[in-house]
């Protein structure tokens, strides 16, 4: 009796391509979910359904599952047994501790940026400050917040330390879960934050490492203190608004 021909073994090259494709999809899903969390489209406490996300993004559930794991590892979502995956909610005490870590990182960023910032980076920082000055006059929090993020990230890049930049970005992503819930109470401080940014750029441009380090540390700690004062009367944790720093 003749035997049916054996099925061809999967090609190692094909398997590698499948793995690469899966990893690429996972990265794309993760970035999109991060964007939705940062923009407030996915609010703190929102439940993420694997099947719904897969359908919305037109991918299989595997990359979504892996993206959930990655987001859990970096502190943007939490996974609860038998309940599911939720966008993380950050309490005031947790935010206070994260601010302390951010202040230490920003101080180092200021010192290194004053030593290493390139002319093009300084030009970019000055341009961002001008845009923030215009927005500050209108007290437009929605317009100010992304400019503020871009300013601090540009400064972190100017420090010229990839490990520092990666750790800074992780802390900022985590802190943004809370900062989005605070700016209505601190919106009048946007001009103060903008003046801080002007002074920081001036110190970095002069190459004054100690001054840039001190200004950035004080900028973050002052921001935390303004936030705590603003929230203390009611103890509320309003959603959908942002803090300027």
Image (spheres, rainbow, N blue to C red):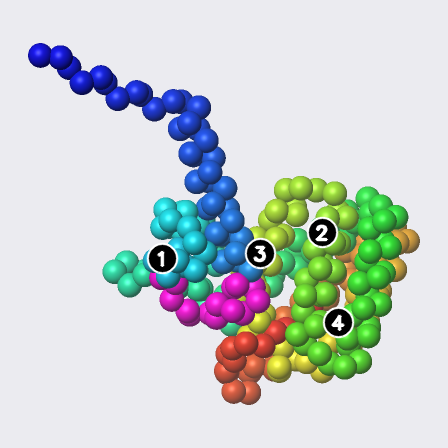
First reached walking from the N terminus: tag 4 or tag 1: 1
Q: Quadrant of residue 115?
A: top right
Q: Nearer the viewer, residue 138 or 74?
A: 138
Residue wearing tag 1: 50
Pinpoint residue 192: horizontal percent, then vertical percent: 77, 75
Give the residue at mark 4: 193
Label of residue 156 in the image: 2
Dot 1, crowdedness within 10 Å: few (<14), some or many (≥20)? some
Q: Secondary structure at mark 4?
A: helix
Q: Is residue 155 above or below residue 243?
A: above
93 above or below 4?
A: below
Task: Report x, y in % for residue 190.
Answer: 73, 76
**Is residue 192 visible in the rendered structure shown here?**
no
4 and 1 marks in contact (CB < 8 Å): no
Q: Earlier in the sequence, mark 4 or mark 3?
A: 3
Find out whether residue 60 is within the magenta segment.
Answer: no
The stretch of residues the image draws in magenta is 36-50
Upstream in the sequence, badge 3 or badge 1?
Answer: 1
- Marks 3 and 1 sit apart, C-alpha to C-alpha, by 26 Å
Tell me what residue is drawn at x 58 percent, y 56 percent: 171
- SS for tag 1? helix
Gap between marks 4 and 2, in whole Å? 17 Å
Of the two numbered discs 3 and 2 on the same chain, state the one appearing first in sequence: 2
| Residue 121 image position (x, y, % from top left) | 82, 51
Horizontal relation, residue 111 to residue 227: left or right: right
Residue at the spot of label 3: 171
User: Quarter-wise, where is residue 153 in the image?
Assistant: bottom right
- Of callouts 1 and 2, which one flags the residue occurring earlier in the amino acid sequence? 1
Of badges 4 and 1, the one in the foreground is: 1
| Residue at the spot 30% in from the left edge and 20% down from the top edge | 8
Q: Nearer the viewer, mark 3 or mark 1?
A: 1
């Amino acid at each position: 009796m003749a035997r049916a021909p054996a099925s061809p073994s999967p090609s190692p090259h094909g398997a590698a391509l499948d793995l690469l494709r899966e990893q690429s999809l996972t990265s794309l899903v993760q970035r999109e979910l991060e964007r939705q969390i940062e923009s407030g489209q996915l609010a703190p406490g929102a439940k993420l359904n694997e099947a719904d996300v897969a359908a919305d993004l037109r991918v299989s559930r595997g990359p979504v599952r892996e993206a959930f794991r990655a987001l859990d590892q970096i502190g943007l979502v939490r996974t609860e047994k038998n309940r599911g995956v939720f966008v993380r909610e950050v309490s005031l005490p947790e935010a206070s501790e994260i601010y302390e870590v951010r202040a230490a990182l920003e101080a180092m960023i200021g010192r290194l940026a004053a030593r290493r910032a390139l002319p093009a980076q300084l030009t970019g920082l000055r341009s961002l400050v001008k845009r923030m000055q215009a927005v500050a006059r209108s007290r437009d929090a929605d317009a100010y917040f992304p400019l503020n993020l871009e300013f601090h990230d540009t400064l972190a890049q100017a420090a010229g330390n990839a490990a520092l930049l990666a750790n800074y970005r992780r802390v900022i992503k985590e802190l943004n879960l809370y900062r989005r819930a605070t700016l209505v109470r601190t919106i009048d401080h946007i001009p103060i934050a903008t003046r801080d940014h002007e002074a920081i750029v001036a110190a970095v441009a002069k190459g004054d490492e100690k001054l840039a380090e001190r200004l950035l540390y004080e900028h973050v700690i002052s921001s935390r203190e303004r936030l705590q004062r603003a929230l203390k009367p009611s103890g509320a944790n309003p959603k959908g608004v942002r803090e300027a720093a």
